[in-house]
Image (cartoon, rainbow, N blue to C red):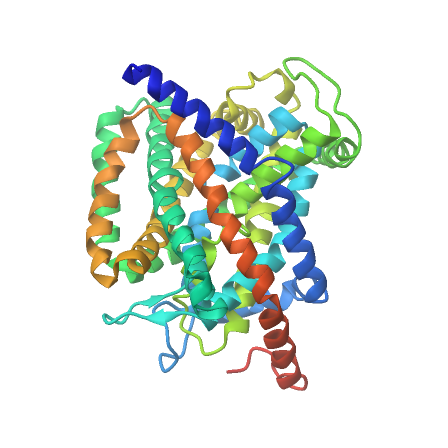
Amino acid sequence: MEPVSFLATLHGWIGTLGGLVWGPYCLLPLLVGTGVYLVCGLKFLPWRYVGPAFMHMWRGRRSNDAHGGELSPFKAMMTCMAATIGTGNIVGVATAIMIGGPGAVFWMWVTAAVGMATKYAEALLAVKYREVTPTGDYVGGPMYYIKNGLGDSWKWMAFLFAIFGMVASFGIGNMTQCNAITGNLATAFSLPPEAVAVVLFVLVGLVLIGGVKRIGDVAGVVVPFMAVAYILIGIVIMLTNYDKVGPAFMSIIENAFSPAPAAGGFAGATIMMAMRYGMARGLFSNEAGLGSGPIAHATAITNNPVRQGFLGMIDPFIDTILVCTMTALIILIAGDWSAVDRGSAAVMTSHAFGHALPGIGQYFVAIALVLFAFTTILGWCVYGERCAVYLFGHKALKPFRLIFTLVVPLGALAELSFVWDLSDLFNGLMALPNLVALLLLSPVVFKMTREYFEKHAKGDMFDE
C-alpha cells in the first residue's frame, strides 16, 4: 500500500473509531449518566452551593504553606481552567449551533449542570490520592486515584489513562491550539504564520521552563482577565441588543425539544442532533469527566480534598454556563447564523461579534481566541507531563517539557485534520477509565462529603 493511501485509510479508521467512542451509545451516555448519578448521590450539592463555592474561590487566592501542595487553590483552579477555556468556547459553540441548531446550546447547559458534580468528585479524589515525587512535585489525577484508590489489580487502567493523556496533550493541547493561533492572527491581522510560530515557540518555552509554578502564575492572571473581559463584552452586546436577547433564549429552549427548521445554508436539525452535538461540544469545552482537570487540582495547597472539590465544581459553570452562553447568545443575536457556511465555525463567531460591534468585534474574537488557545497549551502541558511522570518517573519532567515546546512550531504550521481526529479519539479514550474509577470510588466521595458537612455544621464550612 502506498504511503499516501495508507495515511488516508488510517485517517478514515481514526475518524470512524472516534465517532464510535463519542457516539450516542458509548461515551456520551456514560459521561452524562455518571454526572447524573453523582448529582443525586451528592444530594444536588453542586447546584445548592454555587454561591459559597465562588466565595471560597476568592479566599483561595491565599493558602497556608504548612499544607501540602505547590499552587494556591485559586491558581490550581486557574491552571485547570486555562485548559478548559479555549477554542471550544468560540469554535465549539459555533459548531454545535451550525449542526444541531440553537437547541444544542440547551444540551450544553445540561452537560455543565451534571458536569459540576463530576468535576467536584474528580478534584476531591485527586487531592485525596495524590503523591509527592522525590523532587517535591505533587502529582495526582485519575492514574493516581485509580492506583491508590482501587488497588494493584486496576493499575492497568491507570497505565492506559496515562498513555491516552500524554498522547492527547500533544494533539488537542498543543498542535491544534498553536494552529488556531497562527490561523487567526494571519486572517485578522495578516501576520505571517512563520513569524507567529517563532514568537509562540519562545513564549511557550519561557513559561514552561519555570515549571508548574510559573504556569500557575501566568494562568492566575491571564485566565481571570480573559474570562471577565469576554463576559463583559458579551454583556455590553446584550444590553445594546436587549430586544433580541429574549427571542434568542426562546429559540434555544424551543429547538431543544422540537426540530430546528432549515433556513438559509442551515439544513435543519432533529432533536437528536441538537442533543448529540450540544452534549459533545459542551463536554469538549468543560472537560468534565475526561480526567484532565483533576491533574491540575492535585497541585493545590490544601489539607482537605473536599474544599478543592468545591473549586472543581464551578469550573463547568464558568466555562459553559457563562462563557459558552455568551458566545451562543451573540451568534443568535446576530440573526444570520444559518447563512454561514457549515465549515466555518470560527468565521460564524467572528461575523457575529463584528455585526454586534462593527469595526472591532472580529478583532476582539481573534485576540480572545489567541489568549484562550495559549493558556490551553500551558494547562495541557501540566496534564501531559504528569502523565509522563506516572509512566516514566520524575526524571521525565524536563525532557517532556522540552519536547512539548519543540512541537509548538510544528503544530503552528502543519495541516492538522488528522491530528484533530486523533485528538478527539484520545480525549474520549481518556474518559473511559476515568469514568469507571469515578463510579467505583463514588462511595468515598459521598462519605468524605458527608463527614465534612457534619464537621462544619455549625461553623464556617471553609474554615481551615
Q: Quadrant of residue 418?
A: top left
* Residue 57 shows in this picture: no
Note whether 131 is above or below 141 in the view shown. below
Count of picture labels: 0
Q: Is residue 19 above or below residue 228?
A: above
Q: Is residue 341 above or below residue 398?
A: above
Residue 250 in the figure: left or right of residue 96: right
Can residue 460 be seen by looking at this rendering? yes
Position of residue 8 measured from the top left corner of the image (x, y, whole percent): 38, 19
* Picture coordinates of residue 241, whole percent (x, y): 67, 33
Q: Is residue 35 left or right of residue 396?
A: right
Q: Quadrant of residue 175?
A: top left
**Viewer-closest of 127 and 151:** 151
Q: At which x and y percent is residue 269?
A: 70, 23
Q: Residue at x 37, y 77 (%)?
A: 68
| Residue shown at the point (55%, 72%) measured from the top left | 306
Q: Nearer the viewer, residue 350 or 107?
A: 107
Quarter of the rendering occupied by the N terminus = top left
Please provide percent x and percent y for residue 273: 68, 29
Q: Is residue 128 left or right of residue 99?
A: left
